[in-house]
């Protein structure tokens, strides 16, 4: 597969989503960093991020709360492979399953202690080794991407980042009565359209939610695609490799058809 074109697995996802726009729920599996136990949770796929000059190395973007256990599982300083994860994505409309092996990076707020960890990862990423992350070396642009992704969400969704730490006992946060006082919407602060009190509340909630909001960046290196939607079942494996072709060389995807 050409190193100057988007990989076929990516165009297959884009084609499926153009018809089934709401089928964006993915599963991300990691390993618990305290014991050899698999952990999986659902995420929302937000967007692809591709460099115009290197379309063969797309990144997948999602989001999370910086306080969740998966963040520790993906940022462990004790393991060089801690940021390896697998994404499973079943698109029912097209009857296609995508399994994506990727290195996953967490982009937190600049004031968060883990921001230094991402800064080191970004500095260490090497475009010559095929890393898609290395194509976007500007730290400030990642913060812009994080805030743009947050701002694009609904006010109801943004409110989820104002809650206490996910997974902690509700009793520690006042029980159901305490939960009833949590914000249900976080609108973007607007001085012109809000009263002074409304603006102060919106600004406080916005800043709190944004401080807990983290971008999840997946840099794929192997993809397994199963297509059950045609006349016969088919399956392919795509592996990112350095390819030498008649019209040049560079990082692309080696494709092999498999028994489904």
Image (spheres, helix red, strand yellow):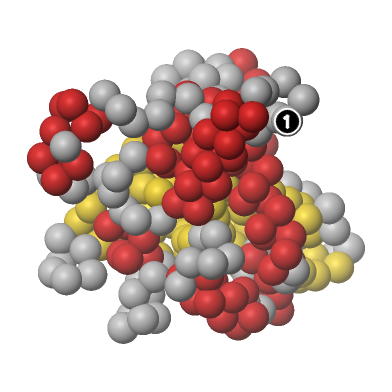
The x and y percentages for residue 225 are 47, 40
Residue occupying the point 24% across, 30% down = 179
Query: Vertically, is 18 above or below 148?
Result: above
- Tag 1: Cα neighbours inside 10 Å, few (<14), some, or many (≥20)? few
Foreground: 18 or 124? Answer: 124
The x and y percentages for residue 203 are 59, 39
The x and y percentages for residue 152 are 64, 33
Q: Of all residues shown, which one is farthest toward the right?
A: 247
Residue occupying the point 62% across, 51% down = 146
Q: How many marks?
A: 1
Query: Vertically, is 121 above or below 46?
Result: below
Q: Is residue 180 left or right of residue 176?
A: right
Residue 212 visible to the viewer:
yes
Q: Secondary structure at mark 1?
A: loop
Q: Is residue 162 left or right of residue 35?
A: right
Foreground: 18 or 43? Answer: 43
Question: For residue 131, what is the image quadrant?
Answer: bottom right
Foreground: 98 or 33? Answer: 33
Q: Is residue 137 left or right of residue 97?
A: right
Query: Vertically, is 184 above or below 234?
Result: above
Q: Is residue 10 left or right of residue 138?
A: left
Looking at the rendering, in which quadrant would you find the C terminus? top left
Query: Vertically, is 176 above or below 81?
Result: above
The residue beneath circle 1 is 191
The x and y percentages for residue 41 are 30, 43
Residue occupying the point 34% across, 75% down = 76
Question: For residue 219, what is the image quadrant?
Answer: bottom right
Residue occupying the point 50% across, 53% down = 211
Residue 47 visible to the viewer:
no
């Amino acid at each position: 597969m050409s190193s100057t074109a988007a990989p076929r697995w990516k165009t297959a996802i884009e084609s499926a989503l153009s018809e089934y726009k709401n089928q964006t729920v993915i599963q991300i599996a990691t390993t618990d960093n305290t014991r050899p136990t698999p952990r999986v949770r659902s995420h929302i796929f937000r967007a692809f991020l591709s460099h115009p000059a290197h379309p063969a190395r797309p990144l997948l973007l999602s989001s999370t709360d910086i306080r969740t256990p998966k963040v520790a599982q993906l940022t462990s300083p004790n393991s060089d492979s801690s940021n390896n994860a697998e994404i499973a994505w079943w698109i029912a409309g097209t009857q296609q399953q995508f399994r994506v092996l990727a290195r996953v990076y967490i982009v937190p707020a600049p004031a968060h202690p883990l921001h230094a960890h991402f800064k080191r990862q970004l500095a260490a990423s090497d475009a010559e080794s095929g890393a898609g992350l290395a194509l976007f070396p500007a730290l400030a642009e990642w913060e812009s991407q994080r805030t743009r992704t947050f701002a694009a969400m609904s006010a109801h969704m943004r409110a989820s980042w104002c809650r206490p730490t996910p997974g902690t006992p509700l009793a520690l946060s006042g029980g159901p009565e305490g939960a009833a006082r949590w914000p249900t919407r976080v609108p973007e602060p607007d001085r012109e359209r809000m009263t002074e009190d409304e603006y102060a509340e919106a600004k406080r909630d916005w800043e709190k939610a944004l401080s807990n909001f983290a971008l999840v960046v997946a840099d794929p290196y192997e993809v397994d695609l199963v297509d059950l939607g045609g006349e016969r079942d088919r399956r392919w494996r795509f592996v990112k490799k350095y390819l030498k072709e008649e019209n040049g060389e560079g990082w692309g995807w080696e494709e092999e058809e498999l028994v489904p």
